[in-house]
Amino acid sequence: MLKLILWVLSSLIATVIFSQNSIPDCSFFKKGDFIYKDSSGITWDIKRTGKYQTERNKQTGLLIKHKITWVSNCEYKLTQIWSNNKDRRKYNRSWIIYKILRVTDKYYSYSCTCTDGREITGVVVKLID
């Protein structure tokens, strides 16, 4: 009887431990050079430092500079602070929060909700020298 109780107890503990989602370590993606494709298939280069992120559209040369604020280990807020495009400057001081959903040693997947309510998901790849 004691063996049965110990078996059931250990099975319950194992189930609880292995059923919990592990929290990914996103610190590898806080600085560096990255690339991603937007929803229209255009490739963007990202350069991320401690406080800033600069995005460059490879096809048009559009540059956008953001202040990056890490809200938690795997969640960050991008606030646009500058652009080389006059039409894009109307978004200065606007922000979006991104949630990192899954990480590997080369990329992360994310989701964000735009100011117009659309939910966007994508993948950002880290470039390693």
Image (spheres, rainbow, N blue to C red):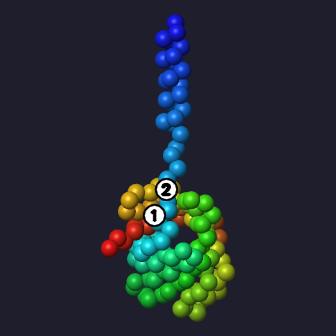
**4, above or below 35, in the image:** above
Judging depth in this view, the residue of 120 and 71 nearest the camera is 71
Residue 81 rendering spot, x and y as whole percentages: 62, 84
* 77 relative to 28 in the view: left or right: right
Provide the secondary structure element on which disc 2 rests: loop
The residue to which callout 1 is attached is: 28
Residue 125 rendering spot, x and y as whole percentages: 40, 67
Residue type at numbered disc 2: Asp
Toward the top, the furthest residue is 1
Quadrant the C terminus occupies: bottom left
Residue 127 rendering spot, x and y as whole percentages: 36, 71
Residue 47 in view in this figure? yes
Toward the right, the furthest residue is 93
Residue occupying image coordinates x 59% and y 87%:
82
* 29 relative to 129 in the view: left or right: right
* 61 relative to 78 in the view: left or right: left
| Mark identifier at residue 25 | 2
Residue occupying image coordinates x 46% and y 83%:
56
Residue 122 in view in this figure? no
- Kindly check if marks 1 and 2 are in contact, taking CB atoms under 8 A apart as contact: yes
